[in-house]
Every structure is written in C-alpha cells, then in structure tokens.
Image (tube, helix red, strand yellow):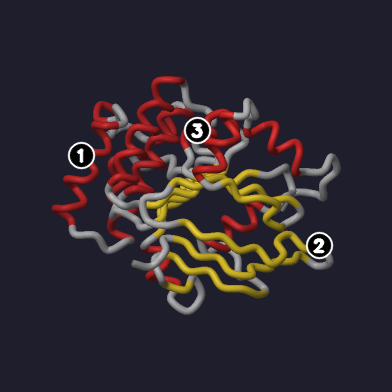
Amino acid sequence: MAAALEIVGLRKAFHRTVAVRDLSMTVEPGQLVGLIGPNGAGKSTTVKVVTGQLLADAGLVKVGGFDVVTHAGVARAKTGYVPQKTELYPFLTGREVLRFVADVRGLDKADSDDAMDELLDRFRLTDAQHRMTREYSEGMARKLAISAALLGDPALLVLDESLTGLDPRAAAEVKAVVQERLQRGTAVLLVSHLLAALERLCDSVVLIDHGQVMSTLAPQELTRMRESGLSLEDHFLEHTERQHPAAH
C-alpha cells in the first residue's frame, strides 16, 4: 500500500529566502503525525505544496501514491484540507457548502448525502445546516470546514491549527471523529502549536526549523520521552533556535 503522504527532498524558496530545504517525511495510512516548529520554520509552505497551492522548486510530493504535480487532480481528490483561517461561502447554507464540495469532488449524490447527514449529526450541526454560514460562530464554521474536508473519505487529512478556536466540547467532538477516521485508514497531518495536545494525540511528531527536519519522534521515542519526565515543549526548546526568519 502506498504511503498516504510521501515527501522527498522538498525545496521551496521565495526570492532569496529558502523556506523549505531538502525536507523529507512520510505519513502512513492510519497514522497521525504532528508537524511542529517555530513561526517561519516552513510549516505553512510545506502544507501549501502538499495541498497544491504552491509548486515546489525541487523534490517529490505524493498523496496516496499520486504526484501532486503530474497527477494534481487525483492527489487533491485524495486530500482533505482545513486551513488555519476558516473561510466559507458566507451566503451559502452549511448544507449548500457541503453539497458544493461534494459536487466539485465528483462524489455520488446519494452516498455524499448520507455522508453529509452523518457528519452534520456528529458535529451537532444538523439544526444549523440550513442557516447561512455568515451566521455561524467560529467553532461552528471550523467544524463545518472539517466536515467538508472529510467528504469522500480522503487518504490524507491535513489539519492546520484546526483545534484553535474550539471550545472543549467541540474539540472533543473533532478528536473523536478524527480517531474514527484513523481507524478506517485515513492518515492525518496535524500542524499545531498546541504541543501538549499533540503529545497526547500523535503517533509521531516531526519538528522542523529553518525549513529542515530537526528531529522525528517515533512512537517509541515519544514513550521514552514521557517516561523520562520530558515534554514535547522541552524537546521543542532544545532543538530550535531563538531567532527565526519571517514566516512563510
């Protein structure tokens, strides 16, 4: 089975600033990997290349075995993405937003209607599905965006600071749905500054700084770190510098 996400030798520069340099990492099906690093470390640039928003200068990126450049349409169809800033169509209802996403992805109407009903119910949005999204709270909008990303059972779910802005109950709902999808084989790349949450949730954690992988904590290493009384924050501070370039 192909990796859900494979990145090999990724490089991306903006004029003279190299945002990502020779970055390699892999996320397997059913695996939750945390991506951490200081502001300006290259996390956002990496995510934008993975999700097809930017073209890399060099390197290889595949989602579900499909190159994000040469098979862009297939790779994007296999990727569910929730950006850091939630942007919905303000004059569409929640249901209409999900219908639009399902149609763009070419999903079967009957199957996608059932999936929408399930997701709306799980995220407690059923009663709000016919309200325009401009009336949604930040938490409701974030849960709808996650629902849209999950339509079509993507091979890879990319969550960029997606737990931010959620109250404890909403965060618990999101975590429960994510765990269910992991058990079904969906892989998750979770980008977050919430290190304590990542320490509890992730199978492994990749730390990048100045566009390079500084460390990869596999499950056994995360366990050893906890047993030694160290936290992910301790590891972060030990392996990153104090000064960083402007964020990309």
Label 2 neighbour load within 10 Å: few <14, some 14-19, many 20+: few
**Residue 107 % position (x, y):** 24, 60
**What is the residue that sits farthest to the bottom in this orientation?**
70
Percent coordinates x, y for residue 238 in the rendering: 76, 38
Residue type indicated by callout 3: Leu
Residue 93 occupies which quadrant of the picture? top left
Instruction: Judge depth for marks 1 and 3 and give the one in front.
Output: 3
- The residue carrying mark 2 is 17
Identify the residue under disc 1.
117
Residue drawn at the location 45% of the way across and 26% of the way down: 137
Q: Looking at the image, is mark 2 or mark 1 earlier in the sequence?
A: 2
For image coordinates 39% across by 33% down, the residue present is: 175
Q: Which residue is mark 3?
A: 163
Q: Is residue 206 above or below residue 121?
A: below
Could you tell whether 79 is left or right of 17 in the image? left
Q: Secondary structure at mark 3?
A: loop
For the residues labelled 3 and 2, say whether their Cβ atoms are less than 8 Å apart.
no
| Helix, strand or loop under label 2 | strand
Q: Secondary structure at mark 1?
A: helix
Q: Identify whether 203 is placed above or below 53.
A: above
Q: Is residue 15 left or right of residue 182?
A: right
Which amino acid type is shown beneath numbered disc 2?
Thr
The extreme left residue here reads 110
195 vs 17, nearest the viewer: 195
